[in-house]
Image (cartoon, grey):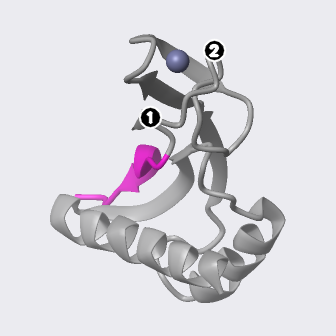
Amino acid sequence: MYEFSLARSMNNAVLSLCKKSGWSRVRHIVLKIGGLRKVNLELMAFIFDVISRGTKTEGASFSIMSLPVIFRCRSCGRDAPSETTEFACPLCGSRDVELLCGLELAIELLEVEKEQE
Ligand SMILES: [Zn+2]
């Protein structure tokens, strides 16, 4: 299940940041996800809720910043955002394209609480 591995790796990444930075709790997580990654957000939120129990991310909410799919076309030389996941230039239809943006997957922002001194 894609959402499971995604939620788990996100949680692990956040927890290791907590350890390094001395955060006691994570309140909110913003994820940056490229448009070519099809993620079921409801499913992911459910899985995250389960795997974060008992950890510093328990109860954290998260939101997704969706990034557009952008192709660079080698035929017409233009960069264009695509509405579909098809590997073709949205402007001239050529399949000689390079993906500029769309597969991103990163933690963009965290809202945390610091450990009390
Ligand atoms: Zn083109």
Q: Quadrant of the N terminus?
A: bottom right
* Residue assigned mark 1: 96
What is the distance, in whole Å, between disc 2 and disc 1 at their CAs? 12 Å
Disc 2 beta carbon < 8 A from ligand 1? yes
Name the disc covering residue 91, or none: 2
Instruction: Tell me the amino acid under the disc marked 1.
Output: Asp
Would you place residue 14 above or below residue 50 in this image? above
Residue 3, position in %: x, y?
A: 64, 76
Would you place residue 32 above or below residue 96 in this image? below
Q: Depth check: 36 or 22 in front?
A: 36
Q: Residue at x 44, y 47 (%)?
A: 104
Q: Is residue 7 rendered to the left or right of residue 42?
A: left
Quarter location, residue 60: bottom right
**Extent of the magenta region:** 103-117
Assign a secondary structure to mark 1. Answer: loop
Q: Is residue 113 rendered to the left or right of residue 21?
A: right
Would you place residue 1 above or below residue 44 in this image? below
Would you place residue 40 above or below residue 70 in this image? below
Q: Residues within 10 Å of mark 1 (few under 14, many from 20)?
A: some
Residue 70, position in %: x, y?
A: 52, 28
**Name of the residue lying farthest toward the right:** 42
Q: Is residue 66 rendered to the left or right of residue 44?
A: left
Q: Earlier in the sequence, mark 2 or mark 1?
A: 2
Q: Residues within 10 Å of mark 2 (few under 14, many from 20)?
A: some
Q: Depth check: 70 or 40 in front?
A: 70
Instruction: Tell me the amino acid under the disc marked 2.
Output: Leu
Residue 49, position in %: x, y?
A: 69, 77
Q: Depth check: 43 or 80 in front?
A: 80
